[in-house]
Image: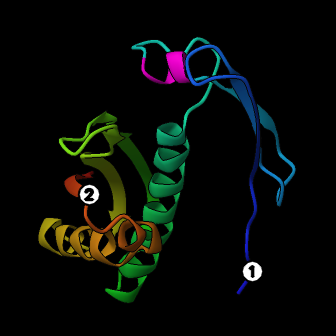
Amino acid sequence: MPTRTARTAWNGTLQEGGGQVELSSSKVGTYDVSFPKRAADEAGGTTSPEELIAAAHSSCYAMQLSALIAEAGGTPVALEVTAEVELGPDPAGGFRIPSIVLTVKGEVEGLDEAGFQQAADAAKATCPVSKALTGTEITLHASLES
């Protein structure tokens, strides 16, 4: 299996510095990062580790759910997955990611609501990014749309 790489170049202090994260394997882009914008309500054109984790988790989950729907005899027509990754204080000091909320809306042929929910729950437990985030509370909201 392949290994993927990203690189960050950082200059300056935490509060006054900044950097760029490069998606090195795919070469699809380089994005600005900044701690003050990471901790602010508005990102102001920069990304953050939490947004990158959200992207990784939502895409991994969508792929895993698609596979599990097919294994259950259904056909995934469309899946819309959102991951909300929270940055919060760590009681031990510093910061941590206390929770992630996954929301999926699915248009699926060949599965009823119960079958879709079962596949959705299994995907949450078995997608590789969910497994990597063990220790973070992951909540799932899944709805089947007709």
Residue at the disc numbered 1: 2
Residue on which the image places disc 2: 136
- Quadrant for the N terminus in the image: bottom right
In the rendered view, does 112 fall on the left or right side of 43?
left
Query: Disc 1 on helix, strand or loop?
Result: loop
Q: Quarter of the image holding residue 83? A: top left
Determine the main secondary structure of the stretch shown in magenta: helix
Magenta segment boundaries in residue numbering: 35-39
Q: Is residue 8 magenta?
A: no
- Residue that appears at 63% across and 13% down: 16
Q: Residue at x 32, y 45 (%)?
A: 97
Looking at numbered disc 1 in the image, what kind of residue is underneath it? Pro
Gap in angstroms between the C-alphas marked 1 and 2:
26 Å
Residue 110 appears in view: no
Of helix, strand and loop, which one carries label 2? loop
Residue at the (61%, 23%) spot, across then down: 34
